[in-house]
Image: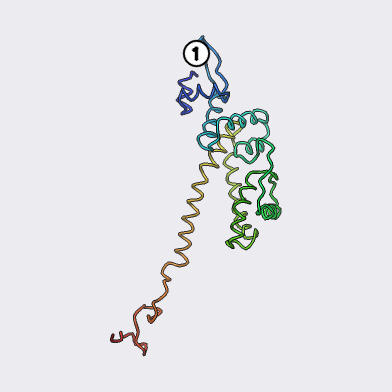
Amino acid sequence: MRLAELSRRSGVSVASIKYYIREGLLPPGRLVAATQAEYDEQHLRRLRLIRALIGVRGLSVGATREVLGALSEHPEDVHRVLGLALGAIRLRDEPPPDSAGQAEVDALVAEMGWQVHRDAPARADLAGTLAPLLRLGALPDWRALLPYAELAERTAVLDLDRLDGAEDPLELAERAVLLTVLLEPALLALRRMAQEHESARRYAGATPARPGADADTGADTDADGTGVPSAR
């Protein structure tokens, strides 16, 4: 396909495609004339992944270049491909930040029996969030997160089920980024809606009666309990 068709099928402007080629994110097309090149399906898949990493996941051009390079080195390792695309694997050997919640996260991961790398960014994210929750008394300890971890585990099964059938590593990485990053706001919205529903189920219509009002009817009662309003 020519550059214009690549742009149309990918939804990326011609100017952006040329920029990605200059920056080394996208390989050049095959020259068919002095000023013309042809592109194939691999260019299209890689371009869609670039758009997902930069436009959806919010990576810089430099970080995207590193992810693409790492993917090219390990195309057959599906676990590594997903880890790189979703940010579960660090690109460099960086020590995780110290956090007061790290021990609690370690205990939670051990209790769940999860295979999560010691330096996974999500560990540090959870530790940083968990520490103030424990300090402020919003949670008694890390065990309070176990039911939520079990829900997250079932959600992860659904996530990975939706990636079945993607054989090309670039397509797999693109689908993983789009599914995870774009679905997270929807999951949060579903949680908020479910909370509202559960609140209505538990508490709607259970407004406490006013002092001096009948518990069933809410009518003011006199000292005899007759329901006749007392003279004021």
Give x and y (percent) for residue 4: 45, 20
Task: Give the image's coloring scheme.
Answer: rainbow
Q: State the residue in front, 174 or 144.
A: 144
Q: State the residue in front, 165 or 207.
A: 207
- Examine the image and state in which quarter residue 62 appears: top right
* Residue, far top: 34
- Examine the image and state in which quarter residue 64 appears: top right
Quarter of the rendering occupied by the C terminus: bottom left
* Residue, far left: 231
> Badge 1: how crowded within 10 Å, few (<14), some, or many (20+)?
few
Q: Residue at x 58, y 49 (%)?
A: 155
* In the image, residue 181 above or below residue 131: above
Amino acid type, label 1: Gln
Give x and y (percent) for residue 139: 60, 61
Q: State the residue in front, 167 or 82.
A: 82
Give x and y (percent) for residue 119: 68, 43
Give x and y (percent) for residue 82: 62, 38
Q: Residue at x 44, y 63 (%)?
A: 200
Residue 112 appears left or right of 216: right
* In the image, residue 49 above or below residue 195: above
- Examine the image and state in which quarter residue 137 appears: bottom right
* In the image, residue 40 above or below residue 135: above
Q: Residue at x 58, y 39 (%)?
A: 163
Q: Which residue is mark 1?
A: 36
Q: Residue at x 51, y 31 (%)?
A: 51
- Circle 1: element type: strand
